[in-house]
Amino acid sequence: MKVDVNISDLKMRMLNALKLRGITGDSAEFMVNDFIEAELGEHSSHGLSKFLLIDAALSKREGPFELVKEIGNYAQVNGHRDLGHMAGLYCVNKAVDLAKKHGNSIVALQNASRYSRLKPFAKRIAECGYIAIIMNNGGPSAVAPYGGTTPIFGTNPICFAFPSECDDPYLFDFSTSKKVWAEIRQAILEKRSLSANCFYDRNGHFTEDPEQANAVMSFGGAKGYALCFAIEILTGAFIGCKMGKAVSDEYDLGFLFIALSPEMFGTLETFKRQVDELANEVRNSSCVENVNSVYIPGDKSKHHLQIGLMSGQISVEEDILNRIYNMEISLSGGLESNSKLN
């Protein structure tokens, strides 16, 4: 059952829970805003239930992340099993700094826990005036190859962000699986079934039972599968991380942060104007039957987010809310991480 709560109150409680765990300042604000905005944007699988995995991640923390290599426009960071949000935020700042010097940059992250969405990291890069391309191996093995049912690839999300003259950058953030693996966690917590014809059980049959799910389809047929495969390589072998069945946990995963300056080949102002013009052409284009508007990727999530923020209220599963409240006053209440609940 869902209950409505005040966003400001919930945010304060989440910040208190992080403070109790020694996480404060910009990192804490960034994390909490990400989880709340994902929930408001109707991406609950990356929202408040993901916050419940903080303690599981902290229990495996080995030390602060470390810059282990920086040569010209590229750098490599060892996360030392630190929180993905914190290590990722460091990588974003490093990517921007290097792009300021070289016009472009690429930063690789290894050995960190998962963060939630790619969108807020890409947004930070774009707000600094750079094009962002961020991707990561979303393993362990979850996605079956096209035509198969054996889980081999991660869900392998990718995000593009483009500076705009409008209030926000254009953000295209999507997984290369037909449904995110985190839908299993959400279905278990909400006591509901999985989406139909997306997940396979161990016998290779479609299942809607979250306890029986063993693999998920890639999106977009053979082309989506090819993109998923490519990201596995770019965030695996390319940066010295594991791939496929060799991935045993989230710390085997790789993350890439790329920043490109529009001024490499033109001016930032011209770039923004041209991108805005293209976006307007898309939004003003003709619709198919029974469709009222053509959207830019991310428009619908942004709309839901704006409505939620204006109302000041957020609807949360009661069990998730109670767990967050418990985390505010004790070092418990979250979820244990496993292949179903990652």
Image: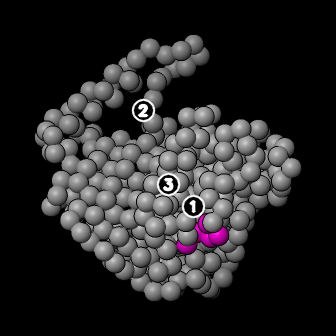
Q: CA distance from mark 2 to mark 1?
A: 32 Å
Q: Are marks 2 and 1 in contact (CB under 8 Å)?
A: no
- Please tell me whether the stretch drawn in magenta is mainly helix, strand or loop: loop
- Percent of width and height locating residue 285: 40, 17
Indicate the secondary structure of the residue bearing disc 2: loop
Q: Are marks 1 and 3 in contact (CB under 8 Å)?
A: yes
**Label 3 Cα neighbours within 10 Å, binned few <14 / some 14-19 / many ≥20:** some
Indicate the secondary structure of the residue bearing disc 3: helix
Q: CA distance from mark 1 to mark 3?
A: 7 Å
Indicate the secondary structure of the residue bearing disc 1: loop
Instruction: Tell me which residue sits at (45%, 29%) in the image.
Output: 295
- Segment tinted magenta in the rendering: 247-251
Residue 300 visible in this rendered orientation of the protein: yes
- Count of residue discs: 3
Q: Amino acid at mark 2?
A: Ile
Q: Amino acid at mark 1?
A: Met
Side (left or right) of 250 relative to 320: left
Q: Which residue is mark 1?
A: 243
Q: Which residue is mark 3?
A: 233
Among the two numbered marks 2 and 1 on one chain, the one whose residue lies closer to the N terminus: 1
Q: Amino acid at mark 3?
A: Ile
The numbered mark at residue 296 is: 2
249 within the magenta span = yes
